[in-house]
Image: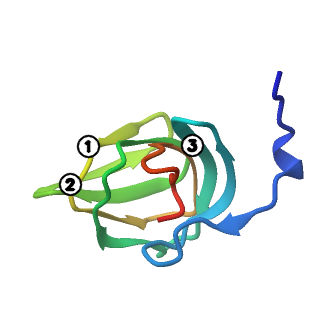
Amino acid sequence: MPVYALDTIREEFVTPKHSAAYGRLITGEQIEVGLLRFKAGEGAKTHSHPHEQIIVMLRGRMKFTLGDEVAEIGKGDAVHIPPNVPHSTVALEDVECVSCKGVVGGVGHRI
């Protein structure tokens, strides 16, 4: 049974082409889970991908733009990003979140 000690997983910038997200990833065959951090003012520029994604906020606040909708989310909130929908985000405070993304063509967060 695969069991992971999160502090033994190497931290990395998981999508440097699109985002300042920094943290650890666990990748399965169909889903990838990331424990990610953003510093206040950081975020992700507008992009889209074929992966479905759900982000759960553990700490801090973020402003999300999803298509034409804008929302602020914080601890205990989540956002669902459907495939191929343009989205962006900015951390309003230091943030820690869990990002779950489908694996498409063998790729998850590392797009």
Secondary-structure class at tag 3: strand
The residue indicated by pointer 3 is 32
Relative side of 13 to 41, left or right: right
How far apart are labels 1 and 2 at the CA level? 6 Å
Residue 18 falls in image quadrant: bottom left
Say what amino acid the circle numbered 1 marks.
Answer: Pro
- Which residue, given by chain and number where applicable, does mark 2 sit on? 85
Determine whether the residue tagged by mark 1 lies in a helix, strand or loop.
loop
Q: Earlier in the sequence, mark 1 or mark 3?
A: 3
In the picture, which quadrant includes the N terminus? top right
Q: Which of 90 and 36 is in front in this view?
A: 36
Quarter assignment of residue 13: bottom right
Question: Could you tell me how far apart the alpha carbons at marks 3 and 2 are, in whole angstroms?
Answer: 19 Å
Tell me if residue 104 comes above or below residue 5 in the rendering.
Answer: below
31 shown above or below 46? above
Mark 2 Cα-neighbour bin, 10 Å: few <14, some 14–19, many ≥20: some
User: Which residue does the image show at 46% across and 78% down from the upper left?
Assistant: 17
Question: Residue lying furthest front in this view?
Answer: 105
Q: Residue 71's x, y, as percent?
A: 25, 51
Q: Which of marks 3 and 2 is nearer the N terminus?
A: 3
User: Which residue lies at the image location 87% right of the left edge and 39% below the top edge?
Assistant: 5
Q: Residue at 41% x, 57% y: name it.
A: 62
Q: Are discs 1 and 2 less than 8 Å apart at CB?
A: yes
Mark 2 residue type = Val
Which of these two is toward me, 86 or 49? 49
Q: Mark on residue 82?
A: 1
- The foreground one among 60 and 15 is 15
Amino acid, disc 3: Glu
In the image: residue 67, left or right of residue 78: left
